[in-house]
Amino acid sequence: MIKKILRLLTKQERKRLYMLFGAMVISAIIEVTGVVSILPFLSLITNPGLIQSNRYLKWLYTSLNFQSNNRFLILVGAIVLVILIVSNILTLLMRWALARFTNMRAYTISRSLLINYLYQPYVFFLNHNTSTLGKDILSEVEKAVVGAILPTLEIFSRGIVALFIFAMLLIVNPVLALSLAVVLGGAYLLIYKTVKQKLYNIGKKSYVANTKRYKALVETFGDVRLIKLRGCENYFINSYSRSAVEIAKFGATNAIVAQAPRYIMEIIIFGGIIIIVLYLLAYGNGFQDFLPLIGLYAFAILRLMPSLQAIFAAASQKRFSTKSIDSLYETMRSFNDEQHLSSTDNEKIERLLLKKEFRLESVTFSYPKTNKPVIQDLNLKAAVNSSVALVGVTGAGKTTIVNIILGLLKPDTGRILVDGIEITDDNLSSWQRNLGYIPQDIYLLDDTVARNIAFGVPDDNIDFDVVEHVAEIANIDNFIVSQLPEGYQTIVGERGVRLSGGQRQRIGIARALYNDPGVLVLDEATSALDGTTEKEIFTAIQNIAKTKTLIIIAHRLTTIKECDVIYILENGSITGIGKYDELIETNENFIKIASVKS
């Protein structure tokens, strides 16, 4: 467990952790000093004669010119009180340091997880449920921190204190100390051995239930409109409730198991002390002689019990959270340690401009865990400032080709060439900086229109003149200015819920044009628009086509009549190349497609 926790921390965080351990030792020594100081003070109270019989006390008494034993006792009592106050203040500071360290780790680990997820290849997200990724970042990290990292530090912190207190008691009275260790340690160990497997089992079940809970929640809010229309609210409520109630029950079981020993041990220990005191009182033999020792043990146990209980509770919580820390450890271990570029660094990447020709050369691609290639030995080219259309039935491989061009998918074989330069991992970001992408489904932030168009650009860097210019090209500027209450500062709602499909699509087009890309890729980008609006959009795009290279997958073939070249796709292969007028006369496959999509 410790190895896995250390793997989740950075080198700098591990150094802080080691410093924290050192602070724990110092805090424990001071805390034990506070406990030890009780014994001489109680001894002096019950036997003031020690002031004169003990040479150290006598020297202190004489050096400070005390004339009364009572005044000297007041000084000793004040010193003991100061030691206890300092001890408790340092203990409180130690608790604060532990809380701050662990809570900051919840931030840094979740951030590290988010960074690693976002920098995974696009194909990674084709094989992972986003609700699971969200659960890992928000829930499992917190469970790992609260259920494993904090308990581990708690065990070390409390364990050092308990060890030092026991060592002190061992020096004072070995027999009593060993008896206490057997009773307390043995009882806690026995209880933990009894429940540890159950804790692991319910922790594992809680992990599975938490995954289902997140999935149910994401699916519930995925399309509220459809849920309301179908009247199936109860179905989704029940789907969420089944896993949520399991988590609640498992959490309650873990909590009671962790706290139960405290009440049992308090009865045993303090009951034992009371019995001893009553026995000494009944027989009246040497009670005064035993009073300092009883006082010391009572105070020591008062400090020891919370530590032992905290250690047991922490060990129980660790056992319950084993699955979370194991899962997080395996996830983090699967990532490489390379330094990722920040968004600031991305701004400094120089564009790889297309000056002559873009080519796909003998490209073959298969999705993971599939045997049949989606794209087979495909060759495609696009001259600079030309318009190229990809046509084919559903499943022909059009979107896959677009994703390869965008650098989101990496070919199994073959090359992507820009003016003869092969696109590799080293220059992929430079190529992507020159691409504009308009998908069929536009994702909008629950934010302003301006931020959605600039998308990912910090507020200080947004060029509002450009925002308005590209909105005009996308034919949405007039709507934004005249119909939205706050113009470009209007919040569009979650996923653009306050806008129509066509309006969302136009914002997506404006977004793609914001960075003035040299290559514009449209993946059925106007499918949500009516025929008239689609024609207007394409007219606007054609106006800038002289300075941009267009790669188009069109929903209606009428929109690609003016394209310089059309590639016909079937089962991942090209079965025809030419202009619209030529293909509509000679290519049977294109004629069939045209009859359906025109």
Image (cartoon, rainbow, N blue to C red):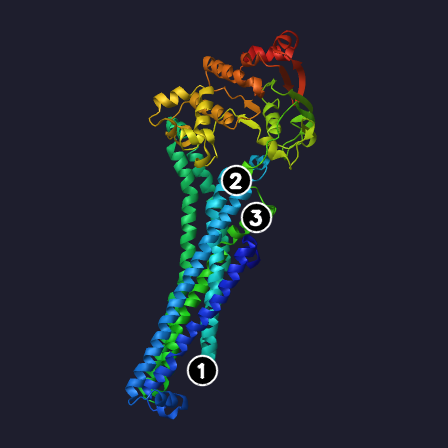
Q: Earlier in the sequence, mark 2 or mark 3?
A: 3
Percent coordinates x, y for residue 561 in the rendering:
57, 11
Q: Which mark is residue 332?
A: 3
Q: CA distance from mark 3 to mark 1?
A: 49 Å
The residue that label 2 is drawn on is 344
Q: Quadrant of the N terminus?
A: bottom right
Q: Secondary structure at mark 1?
A: helix
Q: Is residue 356 above or below residue 32?
A: above
- Residue found 43% across the figure and 47% down from its top: 246
For marks 1 and 2, give the one nearer the viewer. 2
From the viewer's side, name the closer residue of 392 and 26.
Answer: 26
Please indicate whether residue 60 sits to the left or right of residue 406 in the image. Answer: left
For marks 3 and 1, give the one nearer the viewer. 3
Percent coordinates x, y for residue 222 in the rendering:
44, 32
Q: Is residue 113 above or below residue 155?
A: above
Res. 338 visible in picture? yes
